[in-house]
Image: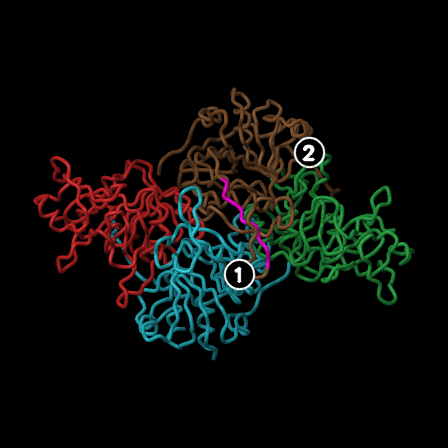
Chain colours: A brown, B cyan, C green, D red
Amino acid sequence: MINKTVSNAEEAIKDIPSGAVLMIGGFGLSGIPENCIAALLKKDINGLTCISNNAGVDDFGIGLMLKKSMVKKMISSYVGENAEFERQLLSGELEVELIPQGTLAERVRAGGAGIPAFFTPAGVGTEVAEGKEVREFDGKLYLMERWLKADFALVKAWKGDTAGNLIYKGTARNFNPMMAAAGKITIAEVEELVPAGELDPNQIHTPGIYVQRIFQGKNYEKRIEHRTIREKR
Amino acid sequence: MINKTVSNAEEAIKDIPSGAVLMIGGFGLSGIPENCIAALLKKDINGLTCISNNAGVDDFGIGLMLKKSMVKKMISSYVGENAEFERQLLSGELEVELIPQGTLAERVRAGGAGIPAFFTPAGVGTEVAEGKEVREFDGKLYLMERWLKADFALVKAWKGDTAGNLIYKGTARNFNPMMAAAGKITIAEVEELVPAGELDPNQIHTPGIYVQRIFQGKNYEKRIEHRTIREKR
Amino acid sequence: MLNKNQIAQRIAKEVKKGQYINLGIGIPTLVANYIPDNLDVVLQSENGLLGIGPFPTEDQIDPDLINAGKQTITMVKGSSLFSSAESFGMIRGGHVHLTILGAMEVSENGDIANWKIPAKMVKGMGGAMDLVASAENIIVAMQHCSKDGQSKLLKKCSLPITGIRCVKKIVSDLAVLEVLPEGGFKLLERAPGISVEEIRSKTEGRLVVEGEIPEMKFD
Amino acid sequence: MLNKNQIAQRIAKEVKKGQYINLGIGIPTLVANYIPDNLDVVLQSENGLLGIGPFPTEDQIDPDLINAGKQTITMVKGSSLFSSAESFGMIRGGHVHLTILGAMEVSENGDIANWKIPAKMVKGMGGAMDLVASAENIIVAMQHCSKDGQSKLLKKCSLPITGIRCVKKIVSDLAVLEVLPEGGFKLLERAPGISVEEIRSKTEGRLVVEGEIPEMKFD
């Protein structure tokens, strides 16, 4: 099987140009491609469109890209917890398309799976429905939604192999599998990279066919947004 | 978590009535719910609609249900390897709806995932397109296809737990996960049933939410349709 | 007048054995504290988990295990993990029996507004629009009135709505109300010490009162 | 005239390094025998496997591991297993680079018929319609003529078609041909000992012959 390994984040993202459409995995700060984002921050590019469920926080994740004014447009479902984001949005610097979370997940899934459009009940009768086809099936109303694809998808997994197969951990899976499939070029960073053949084929979450480049990331911070604990009994 | 265990196949399928719409997992003879089919054969019911990629062979799988004239209609993608099937079809005893395999998989997936309709390129310009809406997206033609659901879905997994979580093995996974989600009542038979908590949550293929009844099957024959081997070197 | 914990406690009584439930952020999260163990319910987190457990102890914290409110959590026995697409497939496909969420406004025909205050709050809808469009039973936890005393149970929502004709029941700090299929808030229970008259005066939408309205009971 | 193995051998030359390939039942399955290892290609089985290995030895046989032709198989290192929905998502989404399949008829505009003979064969299309509607490159392995000498490379298919305008290349027992975007079969290579004239006489659709047509070479 072809070896998709690249040496590091810098090499993996070196051909991402200004104006590119990116998908960035993660939910909140969980399962985000920290190494790729750090490498992007070192590049002199802008005008990016970022498709990501959230927009990071002020000093972590996509929030850092916003601070550097690299992002022209965000396509997300929830963008709270980010003052710089709110400032850019209200000032008109940043274009934002807000999409129901399930619709976002399904549009990305559709992009990877070759489904150009589908119907969902989410958003019927709301401002999300503006300009969209509404159709009744079996007595209920649905909106037609289109697929989403990206020039580059940046995903983060727990384990990966040189053939590009990925296994995620916990709720850090979230949007990563669909984005891996919807990127024209998909770049995967993993905590542990092993030779092809070492992962159980039955436990792969993202088959290697979707991944064009893979590398072992380093220094994962895995910032926690809301640290909630209980007392030990 | 609620315990979904029933004692055996007979108990699991006892309320399946004549005229029910069934989904039956498997591809060829791999990953088929052998125990449930055997129990159905002992019941005096007929007029069933079976949604299954294949129709078994003359003396195994759904082929046995056809022989007993329990099936009114098959919804499948490939029904070769079955003389009795062909006889019933040509004589008009059996109604058959043939669907491209990917469309079948996606229609079942849509049924489980609450997507009433979607667009696919498969079948454009062929007799499969007859009576269906054709629509152009980004310069390519697509057919609109509807979801499929079932009164009962019968699926077969390798391991399962009392909460209904399932893990499949090898290519015996095939249609089982989507069917598990698209059944109003989903009955899972497994080779090994363990208490909730013994399966790794990260390795579950079918979350227990989709499964209403589960039991440990017995005497799996796992018939091989084409035994192909090579000489040991 | 109920406090947040009492609202959560009252909502917990609506839960049935073996249900799969999605709890929204805020008061709905508190509901988990009042659901008896023997009901064997399973809590879904729309970011990809069935089987939310209690918050972790210090040494159990795992940054790769959070709920939809981005709080660190644990898993119970029998949990499963999955992608966001699978998660919303579950929600949209009607497999989640009950959704409990907060609201800024509810209208008498069951419309809900809880995601946007124009020119003021632009955080996004998250999974709320999918949840309200999909779940077979939606219960809202909310304050009956705004801080300046305006009713939030309205004839028609004034804020951008999240979903239409979807709310089945409301537990507010003043009352338990059912949204009637034909429209209108049917008063089911009063908070301890709150009169029907007070509820009527604080409900802008059509209030339906039939017979004697009991006070809520807490164990 | 090529035999089945030679057709497979010739098709194998079309394979490029690192491709993901779906091989249909029959001659296409034989192509695997001729793809050099150093090309690092990955074979997809649409019933849920990437990374088909050789047939098993007697003691490796696993009834839970079959290909789309229901034959027992093995897996190579780096394989992955998945559901039929994921598998056809891969196919439909254009992730599979090359599809090689058999045909009963091909028309000069690239239509293919390979699933049904009315009133005679009603086995179903299986995954063929999805594959031909989705793959970016489709190569057909076929006999140039029927047993009674009728051309199968036609102006228009007479049998019910599987997909429209999708076939890019044909390797028959007589020739290698490209289907031109504007229609027509462009002759690229002749089977050893077969003349252009013979190919012309056995091709009902428009045949385009430009310059000298080389004979196929086999190593």
Q: In the picture, residue C125 is in which quadrant? A: top right
Residue B36 visible in the snapshot: yes
The residue shown at (55%, 65%) is B185
The residue shown at (67%, 39%) is C59
Residue C75 among magenta residues: no
Subunit under mark 1: B
Q: Amino acid at mark 1?
A: Leu
Judging by the rendered image, the residue that carries numbered circle 2 is: A81
Subunit under mark 2: A
Q: In the picture, residue C70 is in which quadrant? A: top right
Number of numbered markers: 2
Q: Relative to B60, is C180 on the left or the right?
A: right
Q: In this orientation, which residue lies closer to the viewer: C148 or C158? A: C158
Are tags 2 and 1 found on a single chain? no
Looking at the image, residue D187 lies above or below residue A84: below
Residue A145 among magenta residues: yes
Q: Measuring from the top left, give residue A172's x and y in whole percent.
A: 57, 40
Q: Secondary structure at mark 2?
A: loop
Question: In the rendered image, which quarter contains the C terminus of chain D?
Answer: top left
Looking at the image, residue D51 lies above or below residue A24: below
Q: Measuring from the top left, give residue C205's x and y in whole percent.
A: 80, 54
Q: In this orientation, which residue lies closer to the viewer: C127 or A221? A: C127
Question: How many neighbours does mark 2 have within 10 angstroms: few (below 14), some (14-19), or many (20 or more)?
Answer: some
Residue most extreme to the front: A131
Q: Which residues are magenta?
A: A140-148
Q: Measuring from the top left, give residue A2's x and y in whole percent.
A: 35, 36
Q: In this orientation, which residue lies closer to the viewer: D62 or C81? A: C81
Judging by the rendered image, the residue that carries numbered circle 1 is: B193
